[in-house]
Amino acid sequence: MPDVPRPPVTDWATDFDHTHPDYAASAPEIWDELRETCPVAHTERFGGAWLPTRHEDVARIAKDTDNFSSQGIIVTDWRPDVPRPMGYAPPITSDPPFHAIARGLLLQFFSPKAIDGWEATARATCRELIAEIKASGTDLVDGAADYAQHIPVRVIADMLDLPREDGDKFRVFIHRIMEEPGQNQVLDYEDTLEAYLSRKIIERRENLGDDLISYLCNADVEGMALEDRHIFGTIALLIIAGIDTTWSGIGSSIWHLAQNPVDRKRWLTDPEVRPFALEEFLRFYAPVTMARLVAEDVEVGGCPMKEGDWTLLPFPSANRDPEAFDNADEFVIDRQRNRHTAFGLGIHRCVGSNLARMEMRVAIEEWMDAFPDFELADPESVTWSTGQVRGPRAMSIRITS
Amino acid sequence: MPTVKIKYDRDACQGHNRCYMLAPELFDTDDEGYAILLVEGDVPAELEEKARLAADNCPEFAIEIID
Ligand code: HEM
Ligand code: SF4
């Protein structure tokens, strides 16, 4: 919980606050309203920030790496102090030309064919979780906390060859970084992601394997080994970027299915609809909003953005823009034209998109096979995360079949 | 019977892999996850619909169908 409650928002066009609980509760309505009335909203909070809501403006900013820097991608009251072009978590915080190097190191591990090799791990994880739920002997289950959140943790732990039991630690680290940015917390260094990973990297160097951490420890770029802060930043990123996000994607999909028996039936009876349904979950419930720092004064949608301002990149809002999608505000399970932007646009396209898709698909398949009928036990009690990753965090489900 | 061709822009492609998932007969992916166009010239008539599907779902507008 925030130390100081955030002042209420009086006007979303001139004083928005995407970390406010009101935003978490009704972000889609806020985007729709702004798109019609003030497509690029502004706030003095966070030292000055913008919120473009149209697909066109979001795409333009994502592709313009000259005027917009990735040095900061989570909006905070301060500005990041790790210099360009690497930033603190390459490649997500990197700018060209360094970005391509940092990203290039990862791509081969996350290509569709490489990810096929992890499907069995994801499926086994889902089945273990479902067996635990069934063994608990109740018809009430928290679809977010007891199911969705564990799936990405276990797969990334295996890819990095870290103990799965450390998954609980990862979630605490991530929660602090993603959902409570900018809160002055006094932490014991030993209890930080940095201390944890630094220890692991030292251990790994002495005992290399064929995992991703070992690969980065061994990698060289033009004859030079990677700097320690690069290795640390990238591993931290893989943990942070892959867990909250995928957890949110799986959770939102279950939330939707719980309330839409027709879509449940279609998923179960028509396997050919599933690839389209998956992309529609990603469009309609896109979990991730990124941010950029304005590197040079520039105008977007008629608004003067100044060097040092933040701008959010709300991919979920772009995904609901009626200019870019037919019936944008409707969930259409078999949508055929769906150029959604859930994984971003341009050079920072989510490196983990093939992994995330596979995990979401397997998680929904296994859940639906085990529990073909279910509903929200108490719709009012579902809580959504605040900040730049959006998904259900507590979601009591009643299994009815 | 009029035929269509596919124009694939490697510079615009960011490896979302939507094309490979929807139309593996027409698109493969390389080791880094970027698309490889598998047909040169005319698209076989039975794959035309899939070609359009791939184009319509590429978030980067990297695929164009030339009628
Ligand atoms: C549903 C789940 C996910 C969503 C919606 C998502 C979304 C995104 C988005 C929108 C970006 C673009 C960032 C930007 O433009 O600044 C991104 C970047 C990234 N994501 Fe994901 N992500 C997901 C899962 C994952 C997973 C599972 C991993 C890996 C374990 C991952 C790793 C990354 C990395 C490394 C980047 C940085 C790419 C770069 O800057 O070149 N993500 N993600
Ligand atoms: S869908 Fe578009 S961006 Fe993605 S791999 Fe295919 S051509 Fe490239």
Image (cartoon, coloured by chain):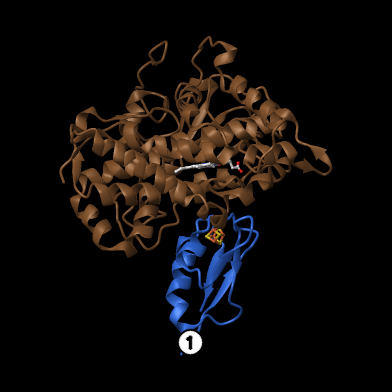
Chain colours: A brown, B blue
Relative vertical location of residue A338 with respect to residue A239 in this rendering, above or below: below
Give the chain letter at badge 1. B
Q: Nearer the viewer, residue A94 or B35?
A: B35
Percent from the top left, x then y, of residue A284?
35, 47
In the image, A35: left or right of A61?
left
Residue at image position (35%, 35%) is: A27
Q: Nearer the viewer, residue A127 or A222?
A: A127
Residue closest to the far left:
A400
Percent from the top left, x then y, of residue A84?
71, 32
Residue at image position (51%, 73%) is: B25
Percent from the top left, x then y, of residue A83?
71, 27
Residue at image position (82%, 44%) is: A222
Q: Secondary structure at mark 1?
A: loop
Residue under pointer 1 = B2
Q: Is residue A52 visible?
A: no
Q: What's under tag 1, amino acid-wise?
A: Pro
Relative vertical location of residue B12 with respect to residue A343 in this rendering, above or below: below
Percent from the top left, x then y, of residue A148?
36, 38
- The quarter of the rendered structure image containing the N terminus of chain A is top left
Residue closest to the far bottom:
B1
In the image, A137: left or right of A175?
left
- Does the closest atom of ligand 2 sit within 8 Å of the Cβ of label 1? no
| Quarter location, residue A386 | top left
Relative vertical location of residue A238 with respect to residue A349 in this rendering, above or below: above
> How many labels, in total?
1
Residue at image position (78%, 41%) is: A220
- Count residues near mark 1 (Cα–Cα under 10 Å), then give few for <14, some for 14-19, many for 20+: few
Q: Is residue A314 visible?
A: yes
